[in-house]
Amino acid sequence: MNLNKMFKPDPKLSSDNMCLRGKVDTGLRCNYKCDFCYYIKNLDDPHKDGNLIYKEIDELYAQGITSFDLSGGESSIHPEFINIIKYAKRYGKVSTLSNGSMFNDYSFMEECYNAGLSEILFSLHGWDKKSHDKLVRHKRAFNNIINSILNCHTVGIRIRINCVITEHFEHLEYLKLMEKIQPTQINFLPINYWSDAETLNSIDYKLISEKLKYVISNIEHNCKINVRYIPLCFMSGYVDNCVGVYQHIYDLTDWNIQSYESSQDKISKDKMFETAYQTRLQSYVKKDECSKCKYLYVCDGIEEQNIKNTLLPVIGDKILKIQ
C-alpha cells in the first residue's frame, strides 16, 4: 500500500518566505558522462537555441523570479554563455551549476564574473582524482574542478557543492576535502531515479545516513549542509538538514520547484504546493509502517527502487510543520 495516495498533506508553514530562484534550462549537452546522470541519452544534443534561453529568462522574470540558476547539461560550454549571464543579470542575481571543466581557465572565470556571475554550484562527487574521475568518466575532472574552486576564491564567486552519494562514499576523506575548499553550502544527494537514472541499483539508506550524520556533526567551518531524497526516519536527529519536495519550496539557496513551462502566471504558494504534491505522488511511496512515524506528513517517503530498505519509524506526535 502507498500511503502517499491515501491523503493530500496540508503541511503548516514555518514561514511564507518562498524561494524566488528559477532554473534556466540552457540545454542538456554536456562534456562529461556521469554514472548517475538523469540525461545520459541526451548529452550529445545540439546546443539549445540562445533565443529560447533569453525567452525563458524573460518569462521567469514575469512570473516573479529574481534570481536565475543556469542549468544544463553543462551550461558553461554553451557558445552564448557569457551573453546569457549578461542577459539574466539585467533582472537579478545569476548563478550556475557546473562540473568545473571550463572554469579551470582563470580568464574565462574572470570574464563570467565581470558579466554578472556571482555563484557556482559545483558537482564534486569524489574525494580524490581516482574516485571523482571514475564517477564522471573524465580524466582530469578532479584537477579541473579543484582549480576552478580555487579560481572562485580568487575572483570572489560564492561556492556551493553538490555531491551524489553512493555506498562507496568515503565520508572521512570527503570531509577533509570540504574543510580545504571551504564551500558555503553542501548538498548531499543520495542517488535518485529520475529519467535515464531509473535503472540504477538500489542503495542502503542506513549505511549512507550514518556517514552523512558524521559529516554534519564534524564539519568545522561555517557551512550549510542539506541532505535530499532520503526518508526522514534515517536522519532522525538531523532532519533540520533534510530537504524534501515541500521543504524545497523554502530552500532559498536552490531553484524553486515550480517549472516555468507549467504556468505563465505569477508564482504562488498554492501552485508550488500542488507541484510538490504531484512530485511526491509520482516519485515516492510510503509503506504501511510509515503510518506509525512522526514524520508521516513532512517526509516524502521512499523511491520504488529502494523499497527493500527496512524503514525505521520514529514514534511520536505527528509533525505538521515544514522544517
Image (spheres, rainbow, N blue to C red):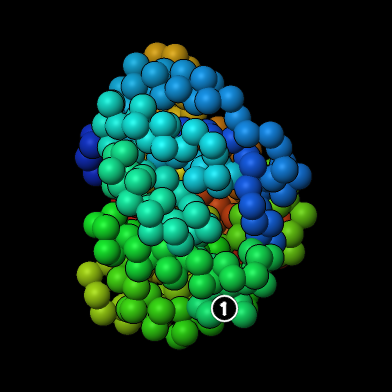
Callout 1: 10 Å neighbours few (<14), some, many (20+)? some
Please give the name of the residue rendered at 35% of the width and 68% of the height, measured from the top-left corner: 150
Residue 185 at what x, y percent from top left? 33, 61
Please give the name of the residue rendered at 59% of the width and 71% of the height, measured from the top-left corner: 140
Residue 208 at what x, y percent from top left? 54, 74
Residue 316 visible in this rendered orientation of the protein: no
Q: How many marks?
A: 1
Q: Nearer the viewer, residue 147 or 303?
A: 147
Of all residues, the one furthest to the front in this rendering is 107
Q: Secondary structure at mark 1?
A: helix
Could you tell whether 138 is left or right of 119 in the image? right
Residue 289 at what x, y percent from top left? 58, 59
The answer to whether 305 is drawn above or below residue 262 in the figure is below
Residue 65 at what x, y percent from top left? 32, 27
Type of the residue with mark 1? Lys
**In which image quadrant can residue 220 be found?**
bottom left
Residue 89 visible in this rendered orientation of the protein: yes
Please give the name of the residue rendered at 24% of the width and 44% of the height, measured from the top-left corner: 14
Could you tell whether 278 is left or right of 175 in the image? right
**In which image quadrant can residue 201 be found?**
bottom right
The answer to whether 16 is drawn above or below residue 200 in the figure is above
Q: Nearer the viewer, residue 279 or 194?
A: 194
- Which residue is tagged 1? 129
Please give the name of the residue rendered at 69% of the width and 45% of the height, measured from the top-left corner: 43
Q: Nearer the viewer, residue 218 or 295?
A: 218
